[in-house]
Image (tube, grey):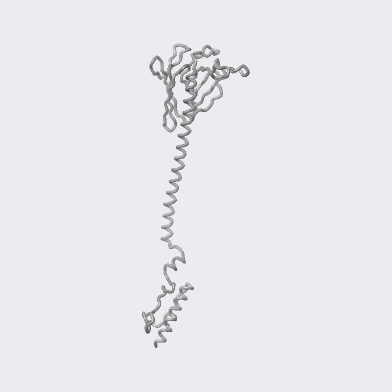
């Protein structure tokens, strides 16, 4: 009887092991042949062996078969969160770079405007330009796209081998958000030279003029040779940033 129990226990173990290795199923008829008492813990002092001790582990089988639906959903949610965070960081970095580039362009343009305006104002001459229809005031104030125009010296070389007029007409304009400066070939002309871009992305430029110790919103000259004592240039950029430049007018300014 004892030998039969041992033999049936071995048969049961072999069936379970074959089912695990071959991913098959144990038939009901095969199980009917087993002694129900073969699952006892010991037979004659010999301990029974569980399937897990022979590598029949449910976690191993699950890993070999792949991920479950819940695990895939959790992984997708985590991946989505990481991707969203990475995208937000990238967009923020690109926006920051664009802002820095815009600020650098504005600063460079403002330095050009300040330097050239200071040169033009300090070299301004109280000399009217001679036009076909009469004298042109030495300083013309803001009108339309023109910000101001003046006659200044010290522009040409004045050299004999390459004679160029040292007195010229300079015109500043704001057109389509672009601040430009044009230098004419001479002083007695209404024709402007080739405009040179100084700054862009400008929404508005407002000028004020100092005369007789007071600031005026409009320039009212009583003489064609009259120059303002100083000029204030208020620049507003398209991003609502502002800049203010105040420059004295005339030689020695």
Image check: 29 left or right of 193?
left
How many badges with numbers are in the image? Answer: 0
Q: Quadrant of the N terminus?
A: bottom left
Picture coordinates of residue 75, whole percent (x, y): 43, 57
- Residue drawn at 42 percent across, 31 percent down: 241
Q: Residue furthest right?
A: 161
Picture coordinates of residue 152, whole percent (x, y): 51, 17
Picture coordinates of residue 191, whole percent (x, y): 55, 19
Q: Answer above or below: position of 79 versus 23.
A: above
Q: Answer above or below: position of 81 versus 114.
A: below
Q: Answer above or below: position of 98 versus 123.
A: below
Can you see residue 247?
yes
- Residue drawn at 43 percent across, 61 percent down: 69
Given residues 83 and 166, the one toward you in this image is 166
Quadrant assignment, res 62 = bottom left
Q: Quadrant of the C terminus?
A: top left
Given residues 113 and 122, the one toward you in this image is 122
């Amino acid at each position: 009887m004892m030998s039969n129990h041992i033999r049936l226990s071995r048969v049961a173990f072999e069936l379970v092991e074959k089912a695990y290795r071959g991913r098959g199923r144990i038939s009901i008829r095969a199980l009917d042949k087993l002694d129900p008492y073969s699952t006892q813990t010991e037979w004659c002092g010999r301990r029974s062996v569980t399937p897990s001790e022979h590598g029949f582990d449910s976690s191993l089988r699950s890993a070999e078969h792949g991920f479950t639906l819940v695990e895939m959903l959790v992984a997708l949610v985590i991946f989505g969160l990481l991707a969203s965070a990475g995208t937000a960081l990238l967009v923020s970095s690109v926006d920051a770079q664009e802002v820095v580039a815009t600020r650098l362009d504005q600063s460079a343009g403002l330095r050009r405007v300040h330097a050239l305006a200071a040169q033009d104002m300090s070299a301004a001459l109280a000399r009217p330009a001679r036009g076909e229809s009469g004298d042109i005031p030495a300083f013309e104030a803001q009108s339309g796209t023109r910000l101001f125009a003046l006659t200044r010296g010290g522009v040409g070389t004045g050299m004999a081998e390459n004679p160029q007029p040292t007195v010229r007409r300079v015109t500043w304009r704001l057109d389509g958000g672009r601040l430009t400066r044009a230098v004419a070939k001479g002083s007695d002309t209404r024709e402007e030279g080739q405009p040179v871009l100084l700054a862009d992305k400008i929404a508005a430029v407002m000028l004020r003029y100092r005369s007789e110790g007071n600031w005026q919103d409009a320039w009212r000259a009583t003489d064609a040779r009259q120059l303002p004592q100083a000029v204030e240039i208020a620049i507003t950029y398209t991003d609502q940033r502002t800049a203010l430049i105040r420059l004295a007018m005339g030689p020695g300014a």
